Amino acid sequence: QKEVEQNSGPLSVPEGAIASLNCTYSDRGSQSFFWYRQYSGKSPELIMSIYSNGDKEDGRFTAQLNKASQYVSLLIRDSQPSDSATYLCAVRVPSGGSYIPTFGRGTSLIVHP
Amino acid sequence: GAGVSQSPSNKVTEKGKDVELRCDPISGHTALYWYRQSLGQGLEFLIYFQGNSAPDKSGLPSDRFSAERTGGSVSTLTIQRTQQEDSAVYLCASSLGTGTSGNTIYFGEGSWLTVV
């Protein structure tokens, strides 16, 4: 089982809809959870970080963390075509006394006009 | 610098040659990470530095890969005797620390390596 799992998609939503992206992780000792956006041919850019259970909102983005269920999600409200990209979930996983940022394979999001 | 800087941005090399990839992290960031991303694939962790030491080298795919960091700043990833399967984008990232705050990692633009 991979440490960080995401549905590869593609997830297709109409413009203006809510896009819901999900991520699960296997190590209960994991701390610090991140969502990155990656456009084709570009490097990942940070969208949000979340450290404690519950919701965290930033503009059109809401991250949700449930440590009991080992689940983190990202909601994108009022989706725009410019949101079309691959969304990467990252989790700091314990490894040899450190916490290594470990990435899921990403979910491809397509927002169609 | 303002962001993570990587060089070269693109490198085409012949199979069997050695290559060096360089990363200059954000000023003041003590932690530095190397990842590899093959076409259409996820990010594969290679190695992590805290200061000049590398507590975790578990991701290096073979003994042809090595990395060093000097002066707690610039890092070099070296691939010896390159193979075609080494073709990928090599991403460097840095973070202020590794604790529960200031541990967000920021990426450079990557070094695109093609082995022919």
Image (cartoon, rainbow, N blue to C red):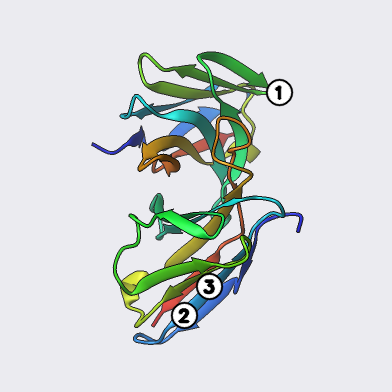
* Residue A74, placed above or below residue A36: above
Same chain, labels 1 and 3: no
1 or 2: mark nearer the eye: 2
Q: Is the residue under label 3 in contact with that under label 2 (CB below 8 Å)?
A: yes
Residue located beneath label 3 in the image: B21
Image quarter of the N terminus of chain B:
bottom right
Above or below for B69 versus A5? below
Secondary structure at numbered mark 3: strand
Q: Quadrant of the C terminus of chain B?
A: bottom left
User: Do the numbered discs 1 and 2 sit on residues whose CB atoms are within 8 Å?
Assistant: no
Q: Are marks 2 and 3 on the same chain?
A: yes
Residue shown at 51%/28% (left/top)? A13
Tag 1 residue: A59
Q: Of the residues shown, which amino acid type is indicated by label 1?
A: Gly
* Left or right: where A98 falls relative to B50: left
- As drawn, the residue found furthest toward the right would be B2
> Residue A9, can we see it?
no
State which chain disc 3 sits on: B
As helix, strand or loop, the secondary structure at mark 2 comes to strand
Q: Amino acid at mark 3?
A: Leu
Res. A51 in view:
yes
Q: Position of residue B15 (x, y in %)?
A: 35, 85
Crowding near pointer 3: few (<14 within 10 Å), some, many (20+)? many
> In this image, A56 relative to B3: left or right?
left
Q: Is residue A69 above or below residue B68?
A: above
Residue B69 sits in which quadrant? bottom right
Which residue is tagged 2?
B19
User: Which amino acid type is marked by label 2?
Assistant: Val
